[in-house]
Amino acid sequence: PPAPAASLAHWHRAASAAALAADPAPWLALAARGFAALPTRSDAVAPGSEADTRVDTWRLSPAQTTRLLDSGPAGGRSRTQAILIASLCAALAPALDSERVALTLEHHGRDGEHGVDVSALVGWFTALSPIVLDDCLRDAPLDLLARAAHALASLAPRRHEYGLVRWLGASQDARQRLDAAGLPEISFNFLGVIGRPANGTFALRPDLIAGERDGANRRSFTLDVVASVIDGELRMDWRYSPKVLDPQHMRDAAQRWIARLDALLDAIAAAPRLAADHPLARLAQHEMDELAPAIADAAIVASLTPLQEGMLFEASAHHASTAFHEQITAAVDGPLDLPRFVAAWQTMLERHDALRAGFVARAGGRPIQFVGAQAALPVTRLDWSDASTPAEQDARLAQWLRDDAAQPFDLSHPPLMRLAIATLGPQRHRWLWSFHHILLDGWSIPVFFRELIAIYAGRDAALPAPRRFADHLAWLALRAPGTAHEAWRARLAGLAPARLAAPARGPARHARRDVTLTRAASGAIEQLAR
């Protein structure tokens, strides 16, 4: 649901709470590596004053701008921003004499990150955050684009956190260290497409606004690069003090940007599929080129969950094993609308992206999973009406289960599930659902059948919209490295490992012992889990 409209006081309370919970570790790690600086004039004091600011404006033609905005099936502002950042970093790397280019990105900060809708509030919510690209001199254009896309995707869910940690964070040490490091001295802001609104006569034109800053003010950044599309042309403003930066050096860098941008657009047009369109998979372009035939219609390409990785490893190492081949069977006594029943299963496949996933184990690289936009559920119809006794029917079922288990799923060819329906009589049926355990866990089973029954009964309109499994994969992929590890180390600090007084290894028999906990102990465990 949309975040509730709120006042500035609501936003302040929410932001203060978010600041206390924000993790400073990713920002401290970024700042610890330092940010390369542009060469300045020998007698200059960077970043200079507003009174001395010079604006060099560069434009792409309408044809070039259209090519940029329509560059591939993903399109949209995020793809355009990634293209601009990748080509800008490639252009700035020689000027910085560094493979590593750091930018400060500006964002409007009105996405309701703290659960508060501030889209209609007048105020100052702009969020600044650093972004860094490595190997800007060595990477091929499409690899640098993939790197930029991943950096932006990683930044998106926490782009408001840098300011919270630096100015409102709970750790004084983190605040001091971020203050000492500062932000990258080059800022970049893509304002998007600026045009006349369809329902009005007037439009704001930032390029026509003059005198918005007092000349006595100190500039915030040594170089500001502001891009926008106005009247069908990409406009690129380079703002700096010529007393600090050499104008010829800036012109050279801007011309390199346009050349790198043109080369990148050529490479995009020639590529059948872009690694940059699937940043959470963290693939280089040559890896995407190798995978392209196997994932031709995939809408989602991503990494696996940790347990999925383990199952894929085991399945790849033991092809003949049925350890992860799951089978669920049930009898239906009474009327069964078979076409409607099969359609309900197909609807479940369409409803949940996790059920359409395929998996590829890559030699020398981490595995990936891919999800097609569509998948047809394999359905087998069986006639067992000639099996007149329950014993005969049970024997048929047992044989079918064995035959089904002997047909392992090819994990690279989804869907990794199939359905068999056996007719035992006019109003007696038995169905068998088999699937690979890599698709779903035990918690998912009752959720699956609740929805399946509702769809078959015609109550699907009352079902809530399904959550995308891809969102969970994104959450996993974008977690700060080491955060979970450190959290568990802190939680378990001081605890000695539990050791069972087991006898020496050897033959053993299985045994079971049931223990009932007190209500207080059960509540404490539940609270800890939450």
Image: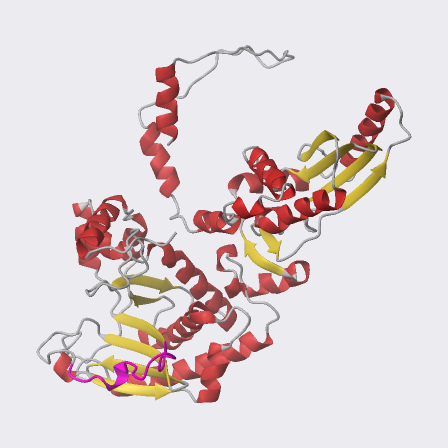
Residue furthest out toward the right: 386
Splitting the image into 4 quarters, where does residue 253 fall?
Answer: bottom left
Residue stretch in magenta: 193-211
Splitting the image into 4 quarters, where does residue 161 fall?
Answer: bottom left
Residue furthest out toward the left: 216
Q: Nearer the viewer, residue 211 or 476?
A: 211
The spot of residue 276 in percent (x, y) is: 50, 65
Splitting the image into 4 quarters, where does residue 181 fall?
Answer: bottom left
Q: Is residue 522 shown above or below 125?
A: above
Q: Is residue 213 shown above or below 145?
A: below
Is any part of residue 397 visible from this angle? Answer: yes
Is any part of residue 364 visible from this angle? Answer: no
The spot of residue 132 in percent (x, y) is: 35, 63
Q: Is residue 359 magenta?
A: no
Q: At 45% from the left edge and 79% from the top edge, which residue is drawn?
A: 261
The spot of residue 127 in percent (x, y) is: 26, 62
Residue 409 left/right relative to 146: right
Residue 167 left/right relative to 420: left
Screen quadrant of the C terminus: top left
The spot of residue 411 in percent (x, y) is: 68, 47
Q: Is residue 194 magenta?
A: yes
Q: Is residue 243 shown above or below 452?
A: below
Q: Nearer the viewer, residue 238 or 126?
A: 126
Give the dominant element type of the magenta stretch: helix, strand or loop.
Answer: loop
Residue 207 left/right relative to 361: left
